[in-house]
Image (spheres, helix red, strand yellow):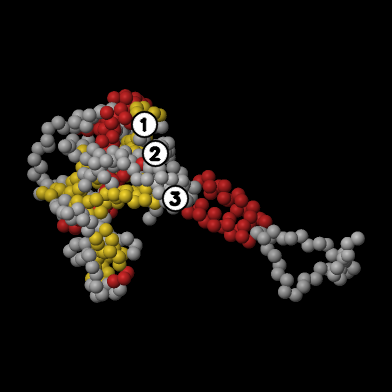
Amino acid sequence: MSNMPRKKLSEGAEAEIDLKPFINFLVVLIPVLMLSAEFAKISIINLKLPEGRGSQTETAVKTPPPNDDSDKLLLTMIVTDSVVTLGAKGGFMPSLFYKEFHKYVSREDRGVEVTVEYDPSNPKKMPLNPKTRKPFTVYERQEIMLYVTDENRNIINCMYTKTNEMLTDANGKPMQKVNPGDTVYVLTNPRRMVIVTNPAQFVLKPLSAYDEMKNRLMKIKQRYVDVPDGNDIILAAENEVAYDKIVQLMDVARAAEFPNIAISKLRS
Amino acid sequence: MAIVRGRNKYATPKSAGLIITSLIDFFSIVVIYLMKSYSAEGSILTNADNLVLPNSVAISKPKEIYLQLAATSDMILVDNVPVVPTDDVRRIPQSVADPIVPKLEEKLQAAYQKEQQMVRLGALNKIQGNVIIQVDKNLEFDVLFKLMNTCGKVGYNNMNFAVMEREQ
């Protein structure tokens, strides 16, 4: 034994870890994880159709419902191709006029993006892909953006945080300007108070109708806490309104804590 | 004969070692990404072809297998079986107060009768009338309303909209 040659470890040589079992483990683990991975996560939105008011068609009523003398709010969001209005039993809030913009992203080249104003009078018109010079398809429409306008159809701007959260004052009014020392409220639920130290932290952007609608709904929720249907809202839409827009408005209602959403048709 | 340079001519030639550090780095990133999208529950909803679901912040998942109604731009499907072209639904006049899609109603009634039979056999406690509606995000509300009205007429009053979960 003593004659056997001995390997000498030279000074400073590192003992190498055998990585083969680890790689084997990873090679087995990756296919297992790929099999159980869920790349497109599908969720559901539950509708709560009000009973006996005609929305639930099994008990459809042909005549208008009798006058409701209860304390119910009967909050309704009316959506058309240029206006969103909130109404309740007592009346209507001022309408929110908006301009609609569609963002298209090319399927062939994800870097090609085009945002155009939507023309409700010509819904089939598609913008041209600047690279291929062919019109985009409706399936390339990525996002529908609604920007609030004034009575002259000019887009209203509002201050936003860098993370795209709207700023309001203490009364929930959108802010167009901030100064150092101002106390502002970020549109989260509940609202987050911020004291402005550096106005450059905020940016002036077109006021999104979704954000303003959330703002209004949160104010209504705060004011009418004790009504029996305080969690309910009816979304009444025109025939031509895209389903995508309806789902975005449903998200707004849920964010403002109106989880029981019913859908109804706006009859002309 | 090749000239052997160096002091030890009997030393075995060293093979060029495979550098696996970068491979392990790559594997680690893939594993982390896959673990992030790992789902123990799986998905009981199947997505119909040519159907783009709208994005939403909703996160609730269907607990049971419900009847699936899908509306694409060209076809209406029940449990992934084509039933009626979407254009036929569009052709129903908008002025009709109680619009019904006849072929869809027929198909839904058959499914509803199956549920009734299951209740009679004791496999179900009661008729639940649940339906998951998958609608292409570019379809107009008119089509959706007619489908919902038909579902409600048959007795499928517990309606759920399938949406694509948006990254928060």
Q: Residue B99, can we see it? A: yes
Q: Which of A257 and A244 is in front in this view?
A: A244
| Image vertical order of residue A119 relative to residue A179, above or below | above
Which of the two residues, B84 or A103, is positioned nearer the viewer here? A103
Q: Looking at the image, which residue is at 24% across and 75% down?
A: A181
Q: Alpha-carbon distance for marks 2 and 1?
A: 10 Å
Return the residue at label 1: B75
Mark 2 highlights which residue?
A: B51
Q: What residue type is labelled 3?
A: Arg
Q: Please tell me whether mark 3 or mark 1 is closer to you in this view.
A: 3
Q: Which residue lies furthest to the front in this view?
A: A133
Numbered badge on residue A206: none
Count neighbours of disc 3 (C-alpha within 10 A) and say few if under 14, some if 14 to 19, many if 20 or more.
Answer: few
Question: Which chain's residue wears label 3?
Answer: A
Three-letter code for the amino acid on which mark 1 is drawn: Met
Image point 10% across, 49% down: which residue?
Answer: A90
* Residue B115, visible in the rendered structure: no
